[in-house]
Image (spheres, rainbow, N blue to C red):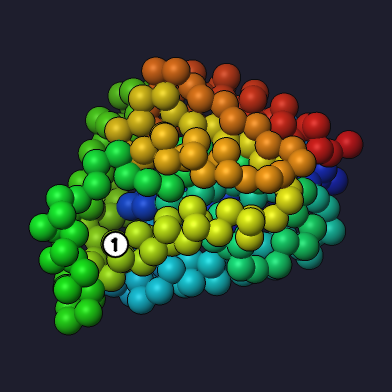
Amino acid sequence: MWKWEVADPRGVIVMVHGAGEHHGRYLWLAKKWNEHGFDVIMGDLPGQGKTRGKRGHIQSFNQYLDSVEEWLDEARLKGVPIFLLGHSMGGLVVIRTLMERSTAMIEGILLSSPCLGLSEPPAKTKEFATKILHRIAPSFSQNAGIRSELATRNEAIREEYIKDELRVTKVSARWYQELSKAMRLAHRYPEKFPNLPLLVLQSGEDYIVNKYDVRQWFDQLSLSEKYYKEWEGFYHEVFNEPERDNVFRHAIGFVNLLTP
């Protein structure tokens, strides 16, 4: 767990990264939140970044929820409003955490291209093979298929990602089955999502997440306050796109509505 703190914070942002990456890819975003008076807490999810254990593998999606709950507990010690921000698979982790765990002191939710469906799901034969493998050889890994050129139009960010030694390029059969189960549960029980202010920032040209699945999930939610913003022409990582300052202005505008 890492913290970026300011004097007399207005609130704290707990950020959850996506699949194959780690907290270090969000330093620009952490600095932006600091500039606006917010502390930031981040960590690496199990099997990702600098965590121990087999890379790209989990026994249960609950391991992700446990990590986020630990970060939230740390944030609650500050006694200020908490905002939970998740990108891609991290967005799905945030959704499942809010469905199952305590929402104490959480004032708002921000989701960046949340993984609620894949843009290119595996072929049915590969899907069937994965279901078998996750039972007989759960840690068997194969290429995750996340291509940097499809994640962002920002060439500098793409180059950094390719050279990143902490990048996870393979995922296990168990990981994929747990991801699929988490997506199904999110869609099946929208009523379990808490009535908290929600902002979804969805890329318009998403080659990783199926934006129509995201919109379908969003439309099912019965919330007092929810906002959906699709960024036309943007690739998956909206906070890494060349126009990311515009995306951040939208995010801070939402948070400013909820904090003094």
Q: Viewed as shown, does residue 122 lie left or right of 174? A: left
Q: Secondary structure at mark 1?
A: helix
Q: Quadrant of the N terminus?
A: bottom right
Q: Residue furthest left?
A: 125
Question: Residue 155, located in which quarter of the rendered image?
Answer: top left
Residue 239 percent coordinates (x, y): 49, 32
Q: Nearer the viewer, residue 50 or 184?
A: 184
Q: Quadrant of the C terminus?
A: top right
Question: Residue 227, located in which quarter of the rendered image?
Answer: top right
Residue 96: tell me if it is visible: yes
Q: How many marks?
A: 1
Q: Nearer the viewer, residue 65 or 79?
A: 65
Q: Residue furthest right?
A: 260
Give the amino acid type for the residue marked by disc 1 in the picture.
Tyr
Residue sitting at x 44%, y 18%: 232
**Which residue, given by chain and number where applicable, does mark 1 sit on?**
176
Residue 177 percent coordinates (x, y): 30, 66
Residue sitting at x 18%, y 59%: 127
Q: Nearer the viewer, residue 188 or 135?
A: 188
| Relative height, residue 110 to residue 235 (above, below) | below
Residue 255 percent coordinates (x, y): 74, 36
